[in-house]
Amino acid sequence: MKRIVTFGEVMMRLSPPGHAKFSQATSLDLAYGGGEANVAISLAYLGMDAVHITRFPDNLIGKAATQFLRHHWVDTSRILYGGEVIGKYFLEKGAVHRSSRVVYEREYSSFALAEPSMFDWDAIFEGADWFHWTGITPAISGGAAQCCREAIQVARSKGIRVSSDINSRKNLWKYGKRQQEVMPELIAGCDIIIAGQRDICEIFGFETTGNKDEEFIAAASQLTAVCPEVMKIFDKEREMLSASHNRIQGKVWNRKRFIQANKLDVTHIVDRVGTGDAYAAGVIYGLLHYQSDEEALAFATAACALKHTVEGDANIVSLEDVLELMTGNTSGKINR
Amino acid sequence: MKRIVTFGEVMMRLSPPGHAKFSQATSLDLAYGGGEANVAISLAYLGMDAVHITRFPDNLIGKAATQFLRHHWVDTSRILYGGEVIGKYFLEKGAVHRSSRVVYEREYSSFALAEPSMFDWDAIFEGADWFHWTGITPAISGGAAQCCREAIQVARSKGIRVSSDINSRKNLWKYGKRQQEVMPELIAGCDIIIAGQRDICEIFGFETTGNKDEEFIAAASQLTAVCPEVMKIFDKEREMLSASHNRIQGKVWNRKRFIQANKLDVTHIVDRVGTGDAYAAGVIYGLLHYQSDEEALAFATAACALKHTVEGDANIVSLEDVLELMTGNTSGKINR
Amino acid sequence: MKRIVTFGEVMMRLSPPGHAKFSQATSLDLAYGGGEANVAISLAYLGMDAVHITRFPDNLIGKAATQFLRHHWVDTSRILYGGEVIGKYFLEKGAVHRSSRVVYEREYSSFALAEPSMFDWDAIFEGADWFHWTGITPAISGGAAQCCREAIQVARSKGIRVSSDINSRKNLWKYGKRQQEVMPELIAGCDIIIAGQRDICEIFGFETTGNKDEEFIAAASQLTAVCPEVMKIFDKEREMLSASHNRIQGKVWNRKRFIQANKLDVTHIVDRVGTGDAYAAGVIYGLLHYQSDEEALAFATAACALKHTVEGDANIVSLEDVLELMTGNTSGKINR
Amino acid sequence: MKRIVTFGEVMMRLSPPGHAKFSQATSLDLAYGGGEANVAISLAYLGMDAVHITRFPDNLIGKAATQFLRHHWVDTSRILYGGEVIGKYFLEKGAVHRSSRVVYEREYSSFALAEPSMFDWDAIFEGADWFHWTGITPAISGGAAQCCREAIQVARSKGIRVSSDINSRKNLWKYGKRQQEVMPELIAGCDIIIAGQRDICEIFGFETTGNKDEEFIAAASQLTAVCPEVMKIFDKEREMLSASHNRIQGKVWNRKRFIQANKLDVTHIVDRVGTGDAYAAGVIYGLLHYQSDEEALAFATAACALKHTVEGDANIVSLEDVLELMTGNTSGKINR
Amino acid sequence: MKRIVTFGEVMMRLSPPGHAKFSQATSLDLAYGGGEANVAISLAYLGMDAVHITRFPDNLIGKAATQFLRHHWVDTSRILYGGEVIGKYFLEKGAVHRSSRVVYEREYSSFALAEPSMFDWDAIFEGADWFHWTGITPAISGGAAQCCREAIQVARSKGIRVSSDINSRKNLWKYGKRQQEVMPELIAGCDIIIAGQRDICEIFGFETTGNKDEEFIAAASQLTAVCPEVMKIFDKEREMLSASHNRIQGKVWNRKRFIQANKLDVTHIVDRVGTGDAYAAGVIYGLLHYQSDEEALAFATAACALKHTVEGDANIVSLEDVLELMTGNTSGKINR
Amino acid sequence: MKRIVTFGEVMMRLSPPGHAKFSQATSLDLAYGGGEANVAISLAYLGMDAVHITRFPDNLIGKAATQFLRHHWVDTSRILYGGEVIGKYFLEKGAVHRSSRVVYEREYSSFALAEPSMFDWDAIFEGADWFHWTGITPAISGGAAQCCREAIQVARSKGIRVSSDINSRKNLWKYGKRQQEVMPELIAGCDIIIAGQRDICEIFGFETTGNKDEEFIAAASQLTAVCPEVMKIFDKEREMLSASHNRIQGKVWNRKRFIQANKLDVTHIVDRVGTGDAYAAGVIYGLLHYQSDEEALAFATAACALKHTVEGDANIVSLEDVLELMTGNTSGKINR
């Protein structure tokens, strides 16, 4: 069983039940999630040995968050405890033309206050096969960025494959650094990148022309040109017909070819959050279990589509569920 | 900030949770609503100063109903207390081909027993810019009709604009008067009318021919002919593909031109009740904030469409939400 | 009022609320259902006198299950009590591409341990007009099969019409008999059969060619050839676009003609379980109340489509609801 | 199995969950209850054949109310349908020093509008052994009072035993009659009366002196003097230490002796409503199943005490539960 | 109607439902509260005009918090918006020997970051009769302390009575000041103080001997000696038999006499939080409405006891409830 | 950190919410528990390394049960999967005089069908310090008994301490053996026994006289006489004032002395189930961490008392909670 290490903040997720708005809520549904932990949970449900590294406050909330990850099969033995508060996000789910609203409260969290020396990466990576991080972590704080940098270095030095979901969100970068200063070096340490054309061009200052696919290929090619370790760049096109109806299509540039998966039509979205993380987990699983990028991509796209039907941040469907959809069964029949 | 006064019954709304039917329910979701109060709440969320006038029993239920309106930003300082029971309606929500069922219990309510002398309209309209009523109020009881008549007169005398959503429901008229006897005079006191061709023709006895739009224009023109104060008549076409899927299109005849908004496709309805009231609120807000009827109409149509995605009677979305949809963003993307 | 007798196991149904998965659930929604009892409940809501025959453990669970049937208007006065456990099924509801998952726990249930001598069919069928059973019952245990055989014999001897929904599920047959050994004799005792081409061919070893409809007609014709009492064979085609969107079309071969109902498009499925039972109930009601098979079929198809919008196993809509859809009103408008 | 007929209004009961107040509630727990129907349900759970007679509106609410009674084993086949609304009561549960609050809405209900000719008492009492009514029914309306009078007459003429729980609540009598004008005649038609000294003296104008028990004996003796058919008068003393802690003691005057049951200490009240009805059901069951009044009284007192631990209006405990407490086991141990 | 101004932080309160612990919760009950806002809500329910001054983030959470206060009748028109996060506290309710656990997250909140110039105290105190603050506010941050100082000064200058609940919690003072440096000056600006002997001695460095009451009298006397404006010092003794059972007794030293209220025995605690604030509100209401300190104290003690039976932070009982208990009715009977 | 291994069936626990009865429930609270797993969870919360050994069906229910144990910190890596169904129990919680009702469904469960060769005890006990089992396991089936026998033998051979909670329930022994035939040998393999006088005498056929404590000492002495390895016998006296109020007192005979802990008064019971298991966990923790039996006993008694305040089967309080109560703080104050 392959061992995957993920690293990043885990937030408390608080959302009004059903379609209610905050102005109507007298209770909030409680879960925990974060871009990287969502990947870990998803991989754990697919049968892999997933370890998540993060930092929680040492109180009953930090313990409950740890228990949530354990509940969902993640190895939590390497989590650190300290600081005062857990990061949080409030989610009000939209529908049709009504947008979902997210309010983040991540500043001063235990994770944001993490310092470089805190994590013993040598020990953490013992026996590991893969390390996954996202562009959210270096955006949170200088300490988090430095931890991430160290992790990538140690992972590379041990021959562990490294992947990153760039997930560029400009308004997260509040601690005095711009992503252009920090991200290129970290990306250069990766084998696999998940990013769109806009992400790549924003960070590296590339320019591209042509139609959508041509622009992605151009951006990806330039990225591989300046980052010799990066082998494949995955992207995902999302056609947003409404908050309740999206179409998803996985794409990859593998330095040789541009491949597209079949488009999947998600007609009745249950929970949109974390679908990108489900895609990332699908990419990792796919690359570890399939020979061809076509298959890996089809697996990732199916995993991503299924996440839209699951409540919460993480894609807790089974391998069997993904395979069924990947092989073309879109009927959603009852399995008795 | 413009001050809007609305007047009408507020009912306790009791509905089984989710898609349950009454024969399955062991608890009922509790809210309060009524055609005019829904308009007040909607305008309050859009940032206006909304005052609702009604009458509740002077007990813990009447207080809770008042608190519901306060909660949703409405000025409740002019509500009267007396009588014995609050009006009620039971709502069983349908889906796809299954109709929603509504059972009203409005007879003998505190509001139905209201008497003309009860409301001090002079004081109520101090500082007001707009008065809105609906055709439901004069249908409830002779007392309610007379209160409504007085309110219109006082409003006009103070130069306050008056709007009405005709909302003709024949089976509500049980107290011995027919709507044809009561409504024309009240309508004549309005600047803005929301009504369909059928409503208008039923009340005024007009006859029309042609296609749908031609019939509406004909009815509206005849109405403006007999009611010289009425400047604009708004209507809303609803294509009911099923209980879960409707299409909405706002329309207006402004004595000069017939204008239609873009059709909005509501593909996953959450709550159908109160969508007409959301439209009325949108009309009022639009007319107060936009120069052109085209813009006002687009605003009202967007507000109406959004209400279909909100639980409860009232359109508690924000101005930002309506503007986003009004300006063509139908993607329902996550706002982080 | 016609009196219908149904016979079969009633299971406790336990399902996570909403779209949750078992790995997320801290409570389970509780209901009771079974193929035959679902038909009884459905017929009771349509206004008929429905009696269900089954066996429950003589404890607080068996009593609660009985109360569920009573609640839904079924005559429970003939239910037997004994044995130790109630059959159960766990249901995790899917959405879009995610399949629903069902886990059955029916072995050693009070019903599975029923023995032939237990039910006094002579008394049970007093005043009855119709007897309905499904292919699930003889699959459960030898005792259940023998009870079913006796019931059919007594019913026939009293001139009561007999219908069966074949519902062939190979993996249910675990007690040492194959359905091919047991079912033909039981089917031969029926007037009305609900079954697809695959069911029929599997049980009788027939072979068919041609398109879907031709295959069904061929199978049905051969069945009527070997079972002279069987007058009509109903089938239902289900096009599964996804777990959230199906299309339904009723069909019948009445020894003379092949008739198809209009296809109904169920675009937002609430609960898929029991839709076949709703169809069976519709067939029974239709045949008892309409002259033509066309009408009976249209009624059954409408009943089936409506069940997709109702939580739980049974079709608890009213006669009025079915008639509205049967006569072409698909708008799901609000009935005030 | 003895057949008991009860007659009276059944209200929809709406209460905030747990200890919440109406000003906090966003949902309400839903049940149905009324003094006489509570007796019927309680007797049904004790294993008797209980028939409740009432009148509901002919809509989905009236059907749901009927289903509630069916669910709880009551024979509902004689219920009438008509009128517009169901009676209602809102219950806010108190705790310790905080009182429970009840708001009734019974005027103009289907039951209050019942008219004498509506119920076919001859048919209703076929095969019945006992008729039970309460003083609430004649207080509701002139029609209800007349129906009650007829029922008592027909019951007596058929030799059926008649019991009444006087339950005098002055503020219920709003239709123009005083209880002193109506009740004496009805009470005179009874064999068994449940009433306190205050009830009796208020209605009959008796005067009493002495300590509590002497006053009750005096009132009861005078009552039996003027009502020769009345054989036994039961009473229940309630010591209210707080809303959460009461002490209960049953008492009876049987024309010969005054008997008191052991006092039962209810230390953690779950739901106080309907405890008097549980006592009445216990009296009826006790008199039908025990030789001595001592035993009947002990049974009734135990039934009453147990009701305090059950949510809802009715005492849905089993015979086994009552017997255990009646025979002195107050330990509330786990029955595995 | 007297107008009371309160000033302080309002936190989001998140607590597992019922007796659940955080390690079991999948949803959290949502409310808002804070020592001073709880007083405002309580006074508003008693019929007074209560204005709360605070600062919330300008997002959907800050709006929802404001709506909560409006819902509970508080005037929110003077609330400021700014900063990033709302203060929070997590509450796990104990029972019997199990303690409740509270985790605060107040640092960096919108309120903690308030600055002196932000509040326009002159405008705020227009028409006000009373100003109430607690010792928690100056403990939160230097800015909050300075705002509090200004408020007291402006209030005094306008002849408004000032009260404070000292509520000394050493571990709240984290911003570099000790309470001994800050509090004495603020206390000196008050007319009415609520504090225990320990609070007073800790802040002023007094020493006391004797039994409990003598110590309180000694501390209070010394306090009035150094603070000539302070007229009365209220205290409350709580005997904690367990988390479910407390006894409460109000006390006051009014420079002349030491008065004690009757002890109230709260035997089944529903929610212990905010009971001190209910006492403070009772003190304010009592002093404004009664001539004697004995009556004011009895009112405050009754209000405090009742709060233990109400879910949430604030004492939302009615004046009628308090009066009933204050005048000795502890029976908690049903009010129909 | 000491490593404890526990072995036994884990059941799905299904209970109506709050005080509801099964005849009222439309949903059931879901948890998992069993005498031995409850001990493991409790020890894990106290900070120990707890491993539970059991067998679950290999389906989504078995996985969810495993996740429950992982959630509560138990090491589940040695659990086996196979068989068809999970054991279950239905729990209806009592109150005051109303008993709780438990219905077990354990026959044919995956655990009951376990066979001797299935568990690799040598590997399981690697690094373990303690093995705990209960008398329920050998009662379930011959296979379970044999597994238990093997586990004890391997544990002893490795010098691991063995404890057992006898928990004698005669009606569990259904597979053809009597506990007298099976238990003595298993008990003889233990160091620590938890059992009452009745348990011991029933199994070993001893006779005792005297008062309660003398009888226990006599039984325990005779047991140690025939089982030379058994060093200490713990017992717990429970005074059941009602289902809501118990008193608990721990006792031990350590071959030399009879020691009693202070009695703890649990006045408001939240959940009575699993309190014996909490005591057993307290005994194990106490013996591993304290020098004196007095302290171990005080710890165990405090742990047991606290469990009565926690929902669910297992004692999920923290070490800090137990120590607080053990050292005499019964006030249940709020820990901020």
Image (cartoon, coloured by chain):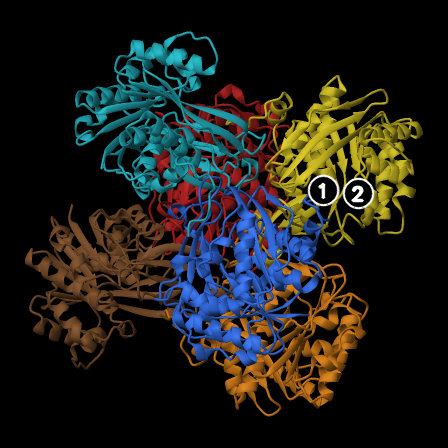
Chain colours: A yellow, B blue, C cyan, D brown, E orange, F red
Alpha-carbon neighbours of circle 1 within 10 Å: few (<14), some, or many (≥20)? many
Residue E255 drawn at (x, y percent)? 62, 90
Q: Secondary structure at mark 1?
A: loop
Q: Which residue is mark 1?
A: A34
Residue F46 drawn at (x, y percent)? 61, 46
Examine the rendered structure and indicate whether residue D131 appears above or below residue D181. above
Determine contact: label 2, label 1, CB under 8 Å. Answer: yes
Q: Which residue is mark 2?
A: A136
Alpha-carbon neighbours of circle 2 within 10 Å: few (<14), some, or many (≥20)? many
Q: Is residue A278 left or right of residue C178?
A: right
A104 or E171, which lies in front?
A: A104
Residue C157 drawn at (x, y percent)? 17, 20
Residue at mark 2 to residue at mark 1: CA–CA distance? 9 Å
Q: Quadrant of residue A188?
A: top right
Q: What residue appears at the point 35 percent right and 61 percent down from the top-left corner?
A: D88
Residue D81 drawn at (x, y percent)? 26, 53
